[in-house]
Image (cartoon, helix red, strand yellow):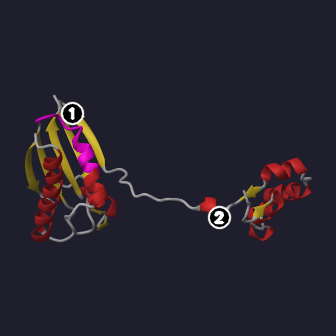
Amino acid sequence: MSRTGRLLTVPALAAVLVAPWALPAAAADQDDDLARLEATEITPAMLADAVVELDPADAVFTLTTTVIGLERTQEQAGTSVVTLTSDLLFDFGESELTPASAAALAELAQAITPGAAVAVDGHTDSVSGDDVNVPLSQARAQAVADVLAATRPDLVLTVTGHGSAVPVAPNTAEGADNPAGRAQNRRVELTYATA
């Protein structure tokens, strides 16, 4: 096997990681550490253990897109509420599910109680008015319901769009925009009996 690429030795790595010009002027402890590092004798065994050989052929990584943190489930008194994060389901201002989201929803549907009546409720943040938010929340809830119906035809689905009427977090904080709160409000909730 041929080895290509650059060898990075401990002294070279130390020079890169603790370059003297990168140290703060008042950092006496760091200066002492640097002096000890420079005074350390590097043995052949240490060097052999510390050499990293990089082969460009091995440096190729395959990246895949996955949906992380899509849902949060709360169970209370025989009822499950699954909150789906709209920001992971849909592009901004859109109601068409991404392919990864549709696949994740189909998998999630398998956990729903057989034959359950499922309320599918769409919600938005307060940006834009009801004339935009109510139809958007309805369309997003319907998109989720369509995947559930295709995956689990035994489910009885009720679809409702609430717009920004039922926030779970403040859309503003101390008179300023609250992006974190608005993100929590953009959601689709699935509610069904578990018992």
Number of other residues with Cα within 10 Å of mark 1, as a class: few under 14, some 14 to 19, many 20 or more: few
Q: Which residue is mark 2?
A: 56
* Numbered disc 2: secondary structure: helix
Side of 164 relative to 176 (left or right): left
Q: Residue at x 25, y 39 (%)?
A: 74
Instruction: Give the extent of the magenta segment.
Output: 104-115
Number of other residues with Cα within 10 Å of mark 2, as a class: few under 14, some 14 to 19, many 20 or more: few
* Numbered disc 1: secondary structure: strand
Please give the label number shown on residue 76.
Answer: 1
Q: Amino acid at mark 1?
A: Gln
Q: Going from the N terminus, do you reach mark 1 or mark 2 first?
A: 2
The answer to which image quadrant residue 160 occupies is bottom left
The answer to whether residue 11 is above or below residue 194 is below
C-beta proximity under 8 Å, tags 1 and 2: no
Q: Nearer the viewer, residue 87 or 127?
A: 87
Q: Position of residue 12 (x, y in %)?
A: 80, 63
Q: Nearer the viewer, residue 110 or 158?
A: 110
Q: Which quarter shows the N terminus? A: bottom right
The answer to whether residue 86 is above or below residue 115 is below
Q: Nearer the viewer, residue 36 or 111?
A: 111
Side of 28 relative to 92 (left or right): right
- The number of numbered discs placed on residues in the rendered structure image is 2
Is residue 184 visible in the rendered structure shown here? no
Q: Amino acid at mark 2?
A: Pro
Q: Is residue 113 magenta?
A: yes
Please give the label number shown on residue 66.
Answer: none
